[in-house]
Amino acid sequence: MASKEKFIKGRGAQINPANKFHNWVYDQEPIDWADQSEDEPLLKTQFIPVYPKTIVNKVESPDIPLEYSLNPYQGCEHGCIYCYARVTHQFWGYSAGLDFEQKILVKKNAPELLAKKLQCKSWQAHSIMVSGNTDCYQPCERQFQITRQLLETFWRYRHPVGLITKNSLILRDLDILKKLASEKLVHVAISVTSLDESLRKFMEPRTASGLNRLKVIKKLTDEGIPVFAMLAPIIPGLNDHEIFDLTKATAEAGSLGCTFQIVRLNGEIGTIFEDWLEKTFPDKKEKVLNKIKSCHGGNLQDSRFNVRMRGEGKIAEVIASQFQLAKRKYYEGREMPTYNVALHSQYKTGQLSLF
Protein backbone atom coordinates (compact mmCIF):
# COMPACT_ATOMS: atom_id res chain seq x y z
CA MET A 1 0.00 0.00 0.00
CA ALA A 2 0.93 3.64 -0.38
CA SER A 3 3.58 5.17 1.82
CA LYS A 4 1.99 7.99 3.84
CA GLU A 5 5.27 9.87 3.79
CA LYS A 6 5.59 9.84 0.00
CA PHE A 7 2.06 9.85 -1.39
CA ILE A 8 0.17 12.98 -2.39
CA LYS A 9 -3.32 12.66 -0.98
CA GLY A 10 -6.18 13.31 -3.36
CA ARG A 11 -4.03 12.88 -6.48
CA GLY A 12 -3.58 9.95 -8.82
CA ALA A 13 -0.30 10.85 -10.50
CA GLN A 14 2.56 11.40 -8.11
CA ILE A 15 5.06 12.85 -10.60
CA ASN A 16 5.28 15.27 -13.52
CA PRO A 17 7.12 13.57 -16.39
CA ALA A 18 8.64 15.85 -18.99
CA ASN A 19 6.49 17.24 -21.79
CA LYS A 20 7.84 15.71 -25.00
CA PHE A 21 7.19 18.98 -26.85
CA HIS A 22 9.42 20.99 -24.48
CA ASN A 23 13.16 21.13 -23.89
CA TRP A 24 12.94 21.65 -20.14
CA VAL A 25 12.43 19.03 -17.43
CA TYR A 26 9.80 19.27 -14.69
CA ASP A 27 10.59 18.77 -11.02
CA GLN A 28 9.67 15.11 -10.63
CA GLU A 29 8.61 15.52 -7.01
CA PRO A 30 7.54 19.17 -6.58
CA ILE A 31 6.61 18.66 -2.94
CA ASP A 32 7.85 19.91 0.39
CA TRP A 33 6.99 16.75 2.30
CA ALA A 34 7.32 18.54 5.62
CA ASP A 35 4.11 20.39 4.73
CA GLN A 36 2.09 17.19 4.33
CA SER A 37 -0.96 17.09 6.60
CA GLU A 38 -4.19 15.15 6.83
CA ASP A 39 -6.46 18.16 6.41
CA GLU A 40 -4.81 20.35 3.76
CA PRO A 41 -4.03 19.11 0.24
CA LEU A 42 -0.45 19.65 -0.87
CA LEU A 43 -1.29 20.63 -4.44
CA LYS A 44 -4.30 22.85 -4.94
CA THR A 45 -6.13 22.87 -8.25
CA GLN A 46 -5.66 25.84 -10.57
CA PHE A 47 -8.43 26.83 -12.98
CA ILE A 48 -7.31 28.53 -16.17
CA PRO A 49 -9.93 30.13 -18.46
CA VAL A 50 -9.47 29.49 -22.18
CA TYR A 51 -11.53 30.59 -25.16
CA PRO A 52 -11.31 28.11 -28.06
CA LYS A 53 -12.62 28.99 -31.51
CA THR A 54 -14.51 25.72 -31.96
CA ILE A 55 -15.94 23.22 -29.50
CA VAL A 56 -17.48 20.32 -31.47
CA ASN A 57 -14.91 17.79 -32.70
CA LYS A 58 -15.33 15.17 -35.41
CA VAL A 59 -14.28 11.76 -34.10
CA GLU A 60 -11.99 10.22 -36.69
CA SER A 61 -10.96 7.01 -34.91
CA PRO A 62 -12.62 4.04 -36.63
CA ASP A 63 -12.93 2.00 -33.43
CA ILE A 64 -14.74 4.66 -31.39
CA PRO A 65 -18.52 4.45 -31.88
CA LEU A 66 -19.00 8.21 -31.73
CA GLU A 67 -19.50 10.77 -34.47
CA TYR A 68 -18.76 13.98 -32.58
CA SER A 69 -17.47 14.95 -29.15
CA LEU A 70 -17.32 18.06 -27.00
CA ASN A 71 -15.16 18.72 -23.94
CA PRO A 72 -15.95 21.67 -21.64
CA TYR A 73 -12.73 21.12 -19.67
CA GLN A 74 -9.18 20.08 -20.47
CA GLY A 75 -7.45 18.23 -17.68
CA CYS A 76 -9.43 16.44 -15.00
CA GLU A 77 -9.51 16.70 -11.21
CA HIS A 78 -10.65 13.11 -10.89
CA GLY A 79 -7.01 12.08 -11.23
CA CYS A 80 -7.64 8.62 -12.70
CA ILE A 81 -4.15 7.20 -12.95
CA TYR A 82 -4.74 5.30 -16.21
CA CYS A 83 -6.55 8.09 -18.12
CA TYR A 84 -5.73 8.04 -21.84
CA ALA A 85 -6.45 11.79 -22.03
CA ARG A 86 -3.41 12.66 -19.92
CA VAL A 87 -1.16 12.85 -22.98
CA THR A 88 -3.39 15.52 -24.55
CA HIS A 89 -2.43 17.95 -21.78
CA GLN A 90 0.99 18.17 -23.36
CA PHE A 91 -0.49 19.96 -26.38
CA TRP A 92 -1.47 22.78 -24.02
CA GLY A 93 2.07 23.05 -22.63
CA TYR A 94 1.67 20.98 -19.46
CA SER A 95 2.75 17.61 -18.11
CA ALA A 96 0.60 14.51 -18.40
CA GLY A 97 1.25 13.84 -14.71
CA LEU A 98 0.24 16.05 -11.80
CA ASP A 99 -0.39 18.98 -14.15
CA PHE A 100 -3.23 17.06 -15.81
CA GLU A 101 -5.25 16.93 -12.59
CA GLN A 102 -3.97 20.16 -11.03
CA LYS A 103 -4.15 22.64 -13.93
CA ILE A 104 -7.68 22.58 -15.38
CA LEU A 105 -8.46 24.57 -18.51
CA VAL A 106 -12.02 25.90 -18.39
CA LYS A 107 -13.67 26.54 -21.76
CA LYS A 108 -15.97 29.30 -20.64
CA ASN A 109 -17.35 30.05 -24.11
CA ALA A 110 -18.32 26.44 -24.82
CA PRO A 111 -22.12 27.00 -24.57
CA GLU A 112 -21.92 29.96 -26.96
CA LEU A 113 -19.84 27.99 -29.46
CA LEU A 114 -22.24 25.04 -29.27
CA ALA A 115 -25.24 27.28 -29.95
CA LYS A 116 -23.55 28.69 -33.04
CA LYS A 117 -22.80 25.19 -34.26
CA LEU A 118 -26.35 23.98 -33.79
CA GLN A 119 -27.73 27.06 -35.56
CA CYS A 120 -25.57 26.49 -38.63
CA LYS A 121 -27.72 25.83 -41.71
CA SER A 122 -25.39 23.11 -42.96
CA TRP A 123 -25.38 21.22 -39.65
CA GLN A 124 -27.34 17.96 -39.62
CA ALA A 125 -28.24 16.50 -36.25
CA HIS A 126 -25.83 13.83 -34.98
CA SER A 127 -25.29 12.63 -31.45
CA ILE A 128 -22.59 14.69 -29.71
CA MET A 129 -20.80 13.06 -26.79
CA VAL A 130 -19.98 15.46 -23.97
CA SER A 131 -16.76 14.21 -22.35
CA GLY A 132 -15.07 12.18 -25.03
CA ASN A 133 -11.79 13.25 -23.40
CA THR A 134 -12.18 14.47 -19.81
CA ASP A 135 -15.12 14.23 -17.41
CA CYS A 136 -17.76 16.94 -17.83
CA TYR A 137 -18.92 16.41 -14.23
CA GLN A 138 -15.52 16.61 -12.58
CA PRO A 139 -15.62 18.54 -9.26
CA CYS A 140 -15.10 22.01 -10.75
CA GLU A 141 -18.38 21.67 -12.71
CA ARG A 142 -20.12 22.43 -9.42
CA GLN A 143 -18.53 25.88 -9.60
CA PHE A 144 -18.52 26.67 -13.33
CA GLN A 145 -21.71 24.88 -14.46
CA ILE A 146 -20.58 24.74 -18.08
CA THR A 147 -22.00 21.26 -18.59
CA ARG A 148 -25.37 22.40 -17.30
CA GLN A 149 -25.33 25.32 -19.73
CA LEU A 150 -24.47 22.92 -22.55
CA LEU A 151 -27.42 20.69 -21.65
CA GLU A 152 -29.70 23.72 -21.65
CA THR A 153 -28.41 24.53 -25.13
CA PHE A 154 -29.00 20.99 -26.37
CA TRP A 155 -32.55 21.17 -25.04
CA ARG A 156 -33.21 24.59 -26.56
CA TYR A 157 -32.27 23.24 -29.98
CA ARG A 158 -33.73 19.76 -29.35
CA HIS A 159 -30.44 18.16 -30.28
CA PRO A 160 -29.30 14.64 -29.24
CA VAL A 161 -26.50 14.45 -26.66
CA GLY A 162 -24.57 11.76 -24.84
CA LEU A 163 -22.68 12.13 -21.56
CA ILE A 164 -20.11 9.93 -19.89
CA THR A 165 -19.09 10.43 -16.29
CA LYS A 166 -18.03 8.75 -13.05
CA ASN A 167 -19.33 11.54 -10.82
CA SER A 168 -22.67 11.65 -9.00
CA LEU A 169 -22.84 15.40 -9.68
CA ILE A 170 -24.80 14.48 -12.82
CA LEU A 171 -27.89 14.09 -10.60
CA ARG A 172 -27.90 17.86 -10.13
CA ASP A 173 -29.12 18.15 -13.73
CA LEU A 174 -31.98 15.67 -13.50
CA ASP A 175 -34.49 18.34 -14.49
CA ILE A 176 -32.87 18.93 -17.89
CA LEU A 177 -31.97 15.27 -18.43
CA LYS A 178 -35.61 14.26 -17.90
CA LYS A 179 -36.76 16.75 -20.52
CA LEU A 180 -34.16 15.50 -23.00
CA ALA A 181 -35.11 11.89 -22.27
CA SER A 182 -38.79 12.64 -22.88
CA GLU A 183 -37.89 13.34 -26.52
CA LYS A 184 -35.27 10.56 -26.80
CA LEU A 185 -32.47 13.10 -26.98
CA VAL A 186 -30.07 11.80 -24.33
CA HIS A 187 -27.96 8.78 -23.41
CA VAL A 188 -25.84 8.62 -20.25
CA ALA A 189 -22.82 6.35 -19.84
CA ILE A 190 -21.61 5.72 -16.30
CA SER A 191 -18.05 4.43 -15.94
CA VAL A 192 -17.77 1.80 -13.20
CA THR A 193 -14.32 0.32 -12.71
CA SER A 194 -14.32 -1.22 -9.23
CA LEU A 195 -16.49 -1.88 -6.20
CA ASP A 196 -13.36 -2.15 -4.05
CA GLU A 197 -12.89 1.18 -2.26
CA SER A 198 -9.35 0.32 -1.19
CA LEU A 199 -8.47 0.26 -4.90
CA ARG A 200 -10.76 3.03 -6.15
CA LYS A 201 -9.56 5.69 -3.72
CA PHE A 202 -5.99 5.40 -5.03
CA MET A 203 -6.79 4.65 -8.68
CA GLU A 204 -9.50 7.33 -9.12
CA PRO A 205 -9.06 9.57 -6.07
CA ARG A 206 -11.64 12.31 -6.69
CA THR A 207 -14.42 10.28 -8.27
CA ALA A 208 -17.63 8.95 -6.77
CA SER A 209 -17.34 5.57 -5.09
CA GLY A 210 -18.38 2.48 -7.01
CA LEU A 211 -21.45 2.13 -4.78
CA ASN A 212 -22.49 5.72 -5.46
CA ARG A 213 -22.11 5.19 -9.20
CA LEU A 214 -24.54 2.28 -8.97
CA LYS A 215 -26.93 4.56 -7.12
CA VAL A 216 -26.58 7.09 -9.94
CA ILE A 217 -27.46 4.42 -12.51
CA LYS A 218 -30.54 3.44 -10.50
CA LYS A 219 -31.70 7.02 -9.98
CA LEU A 220 -31.30 7.94 -13.64
CA THR A 221 -33.06 4.74 -14.70
CA ASP A 222 -35.93 5.38 -12.28
CA GLU A 223 -36.33 8.84 -13.83
CA GLY A 224 -36.58 7.40 -17.34
CA ILE A 225 -33.09 8.34 -18.50
CA PRO A 226 -31.36 5.58 -20.50
CA VAL A 227 -28.03 4.51 -18.99
CA PHE A 228 -25.14 2.52 -20.44
CA ALA A 229 -22.42 1.03 -18.20
CA MET A 230 -18.74 1.40 -19.14
CA LEU A 231 -16.48 -1.14 -17.43
CA ALA A 232 -13.37 0.71 -18.44
CA PRO A 233 -10.62 0.17 -18.11
CA ILE A 234 -10.20 -3.42 -17.07
CA ILE A 235 -6.67 -3.64 -15.66
CA PRO A 236 -5.43 -7.24 -15.50
CA GLY A 237 -4.09 -7.98 -12.05
CA LEU A 238 -6.05 -5.16 -10.41
CA ASN A 239 -9.75 -5.25 -11.29
CA ASP A 240 -10.24 -8.01 -13.87
CA HIS A 241 -11.56 -10.35 -11.16
CA GLU A 242 -14.52 -7.99 -10.73
CA ILE A 243 -15.97 -8.41 -14.24
CA PHE A 244 -18.89 -10.61 -13.18
CA ASP A 245 -19.65 -8.50 -10.10
CA LEU A 246 -19.54 -5.24 -12.05
CA THR A 247 -21.72 -6.57 -14.87
CA LYS A 248 -24.28 -7.96 -12.45
CA ALA A 249 -24.34 -4.85 -10.26
CA THR A 250 -24.78 -2.41 -13.17
CA ALA A 251 -27.54 -4.55 -14.65
CA GLU A 252 -29.37 -4.77 -11.33
CA ALA A 253 -29.11 -0.98 -11.02
CA GLY A 254 -30.97 -0.64 -14.34
CA SER A 255 -28.33 -0.11 -17.02
CA LEU A 256 -29.60 -0.96 -20.50
CA GLY A 257 -26.23 -1.75 -22.04
CA CYS A 258 -22.67 -2.58 -21.07
CA THR A 259 -19.20 -2.73 -22.60
CA PHE A 260 -15.58 -3.01 -21.48
CA GLN A 261 -12.11 -1.86 -22.51
CA ILE A 262 -8.68 -3.13 -21.54
CA VAL A 263 -6.25 -0.55 -20.22
CA ARG A 264 -3.58 0.84 -22.52
CA LEU A 265 -0.84 3.18 -21.31
CA ASN A 266 0.31 5.33 -24.22
CA GLY A 267 3.23 7.73 -24.04
CA GLU A 268 4.06 9.17 -20.65
CA ILE A 269 1.06 7.44 -19.02
CA GLY A 270 3.18 4.29 -18.75
CA THR A 271 5.80 6.12 -16.68
CA ILE A 272 3.13 7.70 -14.48
CA PHE A 273 1.36 4.37 -13.97
CA GLU A 274 4.56 2.49 -13.12
CA ASP A 275 5.48 5.09 -10.50
CA TRP A 276 1.94 4.90 -9.07
CA LEU A 277 2.10 1.11 -8.82
CA GLU A 278 5.43 1.30 -7.02
CA LYS A 279 3.92 3.65 -4.44
CA THR A 280 0.52 1.96 -4.02
CA PHE A 281 0.80 -1.75 -4.80
CA PRO A 282 4.53 -2.52 -5.00
CA ASP A 283 3.97 -6.23 -4.43
CA LYS A 284 1.75 -6.36 -7.54
CA LYS A 285 3.75 -4.03 -9.76
CA GLU A 286 5.64 -6.47 -11.99
CA LYS A 287 2.72 -8.87 -12.27
CA VAL A 288 0.31 -6.12 -13.35
CA LEU A 289 2.74 -4.56 -15.83
CA ASN A 290 3.56 -7.92 -17.39
CA LYS A 291 -0.12 -8.77 -17.78
CA ILE A 292 -0.83 -5.44 -19.45
CA LYS A 293 2.11 -5.95 -21.81
CA SER A 294 0.86 -9.42 -22.72
CA CYS A 295 -2.37 -7.81 -23.98
CA HIS A 296 -0.53 -5.35 -26.22
CA GLY A 297 2.18 -7.26 -28.05
CA GLY A 298 4.73 -6.90 -25.25
CA ASN A 299 4.15 -3.15 -24.74
CA LEU A 300 2.31 -1.02 -22.23
CA GLN A 301 1.02 1.18 -25.04
CA ASP A 302 -1.04 0.29 -28.08
CA SER A 303 -2.23 2.55 -30.90
CA ARG A 304 -3.54 -0.13 -33.25
CA PHE A 305 -7.12 0.53 -34.24
CA ASN A 306 -9.53 -2.31 -33.45
CA VAL A 307 -6.92 -3.93 -31.17
CA ARG A 308 -5.90 -1.25 -28.64
CA MET A 309 -9.14 -1.28 -26.62
CA ARG A 310 -9.66 -5.05 -26.48
CA GLY A 311 -6.09 -6.30 -26.52
CA GLU A 312 -4.88 -9.66 -27.78
CA GLY A 313 -3.36 -12.82 -26.39
CA LYS A 314 -4.54 -15.29 -23.76
CA ILE A 315 -5.24 -12.83 -20.94
CA ALA A 316 -7.23 -10.54 -23.23
CA GLU A 317 -9.17 -13.55 -24.51
CA VAL A 318 -10.03 -14.66 -20.97
CA ILE A 319 -11.22 -11.15 -20.07
CA ALA A 320 -13.36 -10.94 -23.22
CA SER A 321 -14.85 -14.40 -22.58
CA GLN A 322 -15.70 -13.53 -18.98
CA PHE A 323 -17.35 -10.31 -20.06
CA GLN A 324 -19.39 -11.95 -22.82
CA LEU A 325 -20.59 -14.66 -20.46
CA ALA A 326 -21.57 -12.10 -17.83
CA LYS A 327 -23.29 -9.91 -20.39
CA ARG A 328 -25.36 -12.82 -21.73
CA LYS A 329 -26.36 -13.71 -18.18
CA TYR A 330 -27.29 -10.23 -16.94
CA TYR A 331 -28.06 -8.11 -20.03
CA GLU A 332 -30.12 -10.47 -22.18
CA GLY A 333 -32.78 -8.58 -24.17
CA ARG A 334 -31.69 -5.08 -23.14
CA GLU A 335 -30.80 -2.29 -25.55
CA MET A 336 -30.44 1.47 -25.57
CA PRO A 337 -33.13 3.50 -27.37
CA THR A 338 -32.19 5.19 -30.63
CA TYR A 339 -31.63 8.94 -30.68
CA ASN A 340 -34.30 11.21 -32.09
CA VAL A 341 -32.50 13.27 -34.75
CA ALA A 342 -35.66 14.57 -36.41
CA LEU A 343 -36.58 17.35 -33.99
CA HIS A 344 -33.52 19.54 -34.38
CA SER A 345 -34.37 20.87 -37.83
CA GLN A 346 -37.49 22.47 -36.36
CA TYR A 347 -35.56 24.21 -33.60
CA LYS A 348 -32.48 25.62 -35.35
CA THR A 349 -33.43 29.18 -34.43
CA GLY A 350 -33.83 28.19 -30.80
CA GLN A 351 -37.58 28.00 -30.99
CA LEU A 352 -40.12 25.84 -32.81
CA SER A 353 -40.64 26.92 -36.40
CA LEU A 354 -44.15 28.13 -37.27
CA PHE A 355 -43.93 26.44 -40.63
Image (spheres, grey):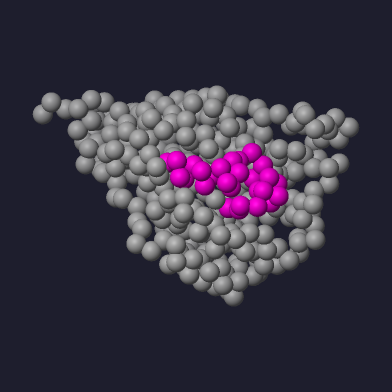
**Picture layout, residue 276 above or below residue 37:** below
- Marker count (numbered): 0
Q: 329 or 135: nearer the eye?
A: 329
**Picture layout, residue 260 above or below residue 37:** below
Residue situated furthest left in the rendering = 355
Q: Say if residue 50 shows up in the picture.
A: no
**Picture layout, residue 121 above or below residue 28:** above
- Our reading of the magenta stretch's main secondary structure is helix
Find residue 331 and report its horizontal and vertical position in percent.
41, 61
Magenta stretch encompasses residue 213: yes
Q: Residue at x 65, y 27 (%)?
A: 46
Q: 322 or 315: nearer the eye?
A: 322
Magenta stretch encompasses residue 162: no
Q: Say if residue 309 shows up in the picture.
A: yes
Q: 75 or 261: nearer the eye?
A: 261
Side of 350 relative to 112 (left or right)? left
Q: Residue at x 53, y 38 (%)?
A: 168
Residue stretch rendered in magenta on the structure:
193-220
Residue situated furthest bottom in the rendering = 314
Residue situated furthest right in the rendering = 34
Q: Residue at x 71, y 38 (%)?
A: 10
Find residue 79 and report its horizontal and vertical position in percent.
64, 42
Q: Residue at x 67, y 42 (%)?
A: 205
Find residue 70 and report its horizontal and vertical position in percent.
44, 39
Side of 348 relative to 90 (left or right)? left
Q: Find residue 303 and report its image quarter.
A: bottom right
Find residue 64 and report its horizontal and vertical position in percent.
44, 55
Q: Quadrant of the C terminus?
A: top left
